[in-house]
Amino acid sequence: MYGNSISMASKALDFLWEKESVISNNLANVETPGYKAKYVTFEEEFKSRLEAAAGDGERDNAGDMSAAIAGSTYRIHTSAGETARADGNNVNADVELMELTRTSLQYQYLLRSVNSDITRFNTVITGQ
């Protein structure tokens, strides 16, 4: 009923939820010797799947778009970046806190947007 926009938002919310979890785990391990920060990717795979679905020039093909959305997933990677500390831990708490704040705001914004869309649909259906 809501089309691909709700499916897309649902995938994005799942990704942002997992990203917050990974960042929180990084922060919890900021003092763990040898711990390597982890990060989550989603956008590039999601974008390439959507572009592939629209590759034939028919961007309105809802089935292809639905399959692209459903097939997209996030991946958790371990940072291979430089270690700034002698104990081998490469978590930068300031960077992680900034990213956690940004991710939390994105999640809240997207959730409000979905709620607003559902409210509009319900208003149209009920006429109230």
Image: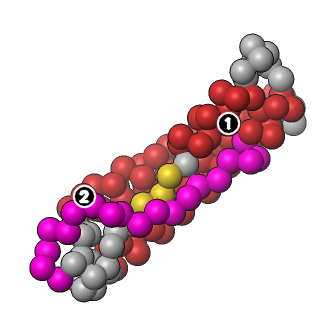
Q: Can you give x and y, in whole percent of width and height, for residue 32 in the image?
A: 27, 85
* Residue type, label 2: Val
State which region is magenta.
69-87
109 and 48: which is toward the camera: 48
Q: Main secondary structure of the magenta part?
A: loop
Residue 34: x and y, percent?
Answer: 27, 82
Residue 85 inside the magenta-drawn segment: yes
Image position, residue 116 (x, y; %): 64, 38
Which residue corresponds to mark 1?
A: 49
> How far apart in space, not on screen, are marks 1 and 2 (Cα)?
29 Å
Q: Which residue is mark 2?
A: 95
**In the rendered view, does 78 fall on the left or right side of 111?**
left
Query: Where is the C terminus found, in terms of image quarters?
Result: top right
Which mark's residue is nearer the viewer, 1 or 2? Answer: 1
| Image position of 81 with respect to 103: above or below | below
Residue depicted at 68% across the width and 47% down the height: 72
SS under mark 2: helix
Q: The N terminus is located in which quarter?
A: top right
